[in-house]
Image (cartoon, grey):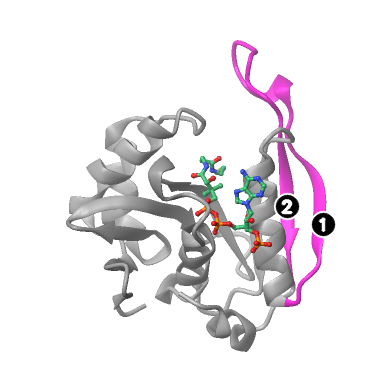
Amino acid sequence: MTSSKDKLDISFRNARLEDGAGIWRVVKDSGVLDLNSAYMYLLLAKDFGDTCVVAEHEGRITGFVTGYRPPNRPESIFLWQVGVDASMRGQGLGKRLLAAFLQSPGAEGAALLETTISPSNEASKALFGAIARELGAEIRVTEGFTESHFPEGGHEAEELYLIGPYTAARANQLKV
Ligand SMILES: CC(C)(COP(=O)(O)OP(=O)(O)OC[C@H]1O[C@@H](n2cnc3c(N)ncnc32)[C@H](O)[C@@H]1OP(=O)(O)O)[C@@H](O)C(=O)NCCC(=O)NCCS
């Protein structure tokens, strides 16, 4: 994906090492997403940048998507975390981040979007429902990670959402 900028002065581009700290900060501030180690976000930004996207406003990361291509499911692209700064939610940024993610170089050849969502996360369900509609794709929801898969208890289940099949043409029509 080439970098694109809009009239709100938000640019969308694939991640690089320098973005790892900003992604970590958006996750931390969200209060909803699982906060992983800063090292992990540095690694993702450095080595999986072609399937990670950031939204940048005045030099600050205000939203991101992390993901990867599952090695044993070449038709799939897995979206791990998506987050938008609380001050910028509800303005279409989440949808544009997903569009940029599906148009990333690392998404080439994929026809199935996979993600997991906790049953209580209404914003996330609405976001992925909207993208499925715009892709003209079906959503199948199956068991992903149950509460018992997580150590120590207290983590809500994560249902697996399979969105597709979708065509590259439809993905490339999504508005970034
Ligand atoms: C989920 C999240 C990324 C959505 O980002 P956003 O920029 O607010 O989303 P958008 O403005 O692009 O909205 C996308 C769609 O979801 C709907 N939506 C967004 N937030 C919603 C909410 N809280 N409740 C219901 N619907 C919601 C919008 O109406 C829109 O639907 P439409 O296209 O049919 O009108 C954001 O709420 C967030 O960062 N949440 C905390 C982190 C998180 O839960 N991430 C997901 C789990 S990995």
Q: Amino acid at mark 1?
A: Arg
Residue lying at the far bottom of the rendered structure: 169
Quadrant in the picture for the C terminus: bottom left
Q: Residue 104's image quarter?
A: bottom left
Residue at 37% from the left image edge and 32% from the top image edge: 29
CB of mark 2 near ligand 1 (< 8 Å): no
Residue at numbered disc 1: 140
Q: Residue 52, how many percent across, how many down?
A: 39, 59
Residue drawn at the location 66% of the way across and 57% of the way down: 128
Relative to 122, residue 12 above or below:
below
68 drawn magenta: no
Tell whether label 2 touches label 1 (CB within 8 Å).
Answer: yes
Tell me the tag on residue 161: 2
Whole-percent x, y for residue 51 in the image: 42, 63
Screen quadrant of the N terminus: bottom left
Locate residue 111, reporting x and y percent: 66, 74
| Viewer-closest of 123 and 148 | 123
In the image, the segment drawn in magenta is: 136-164
Residue 5 falls left or right of residue 85: left
Residue 136: image quadrant is: bottom right
